Amino acid sequence: MRHSGARLFQGVAGQEPETSRGRESRFPRERAIGRTIKLILKDRMPAVRWGRVRRAHLVLFRGQKNPHLKRALESLGGESLDPKQREFYVDPRFVFHFLRFLALTRSPQQAVTLAYLRIAKTRVICMMENYDKRLGTTPKLRWSDVLYRYLPGICVVKVQHGQDLQRRPMPANRKGVLAVWGQFSAEWFPKFGRVEQTYVITGALSDSRYRALVRNVRLRKHPGLCVVSTVKDEEWWGPPRTERRLGYEALMDFIARYRCGSQIPVAIALTVDRFVSGGVDQSELERQYFTDRFGTDIFFPDPSLRFGGLAVDEAEDELENNSKERYSSYALTDASTLSVGATGSTLWEAFGRGNRVLAVNLTDNPAFDFPVPGPWSMRQPSFEDFAARCSELISMPIEQYQALSAEARSYLMYYDSCDLPEERLRRYVEAVLQTGDPDKSNALLNHGRIR
């Protein structure tokens, strides 16, 4: 073993041994240790924790990032888990499983996460679907793929975060659960090539929370157009100009022309996930995008304030600084006469709350159509048809509009004040924990046999 240290160093540094495979096979342990050290050094070392892993039958994947999900399931005693923290437990069982999964995945982050779930005897993982990120591995896998592959006994419940514009080939195998906003998503998402096997209609958690917060609040009315922003990062202010962006820019031209002719006030419902990236304040770029097209005489809500500053008499409380619960775009669509944009989750939710909306697709791609047809949706209209539709919707009494859209709204966005989305999700997850059967739990939920 006198030369084992040298061979271990060669394994880490990537140097080739002087001889070839014969010498490699003579020192398999040193080569394995070298590969393990190389993997760990390539990634950030996990944080060390002393003590044993607590049992956690329910785990909220990055639950600390989503207060709606955490609030919905807190009564079930779920543990939040963030793989980015990479907590390594000094426990013989944990070390054993960590090394086993490290050999399988070649990723310390994945190995730490899988070891924790294995030792915690996790039965259900619940996550917002936008946190099911692609991993920097080959082939490109999502976290759910890793869980299905190495811990197939765990039921993964993802919660719909927004619309789905992708159209994929039909998967050979479907796995897991998606809790969706309404009947449309339950029927059509599988046809879009989604991989989930079970679709559970719960409704939108964020929309439900907004309704609860705004119920006793008066909002200042905005008697004009609300333009719903979908302007995000480099796709919108750098090359290339994508099909979606070209359609959206054509719509902005339509709105600018309509505004000049009607002198109607314009407000912008900003996206909420603005941040500084590469030294650039993307919130400023987003505002600049609209002032370049409509001038400076437009209204922007203040996204740092609850309801964007539109609340007339809302009291300050402990949730004021929670960026997930400010709801400036929700409040502005509620306060405006008509909300116009390309299809998107903000328009879906505004439509579900009974607001006048007009979703316009100025491309020939049906993926960008509003999900349910009606006077609230247009595909490749002329400017004259667009202007006429705006004027028609603005002049339509709200009671008439809501009666006309009632069936479509309930199809797209489930909401029942006596059976709230968060309660439906909680009951479903609780049933899966008890039965271990996602499909049976869905049937029980739909037939009202779990409360």
Image (cartoon, helix red, strand yellow):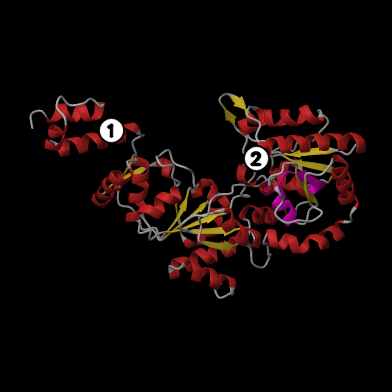
CB atoms at circles 2 and 1 under 8 Å apart? no
Q: Which residue is mark 1?
A: 38
SS of the residue at dot 2? loop
Residue 11 x/y as whole percent: 22, 30
* Residue nearer the viewer, 50 or 290: 290
Q: Is residue 299 left or right of residue 132?
A: right
> Which residue is painted at 65% across and 54% down in the image?
209
> Which residue is painted at 79% across and 46% down in the image?
339
Cα separation between marks 2 and 1: 40 Å
Q: Amino acid at mark 2?
A: Val
Asked if one can make out residue 310 in the rendered structure from this viewpoint, the answer is yes
Residue 368 x/y as whole percent: 68, 46
Q: Which residue is mark 2?
A: 272
Sooner in the amino-acid sequence: mark 2 or mark 1: 1
Q: Which residues are magenta?
A: 335-353
* Residue nearer the viewer, 141 or 274: 141
Q: Quadrant of residue 246?
A: top right
Quick one: quadrant of the C terminus? bottom right
Quick one: quadrant of the N terminus? top left
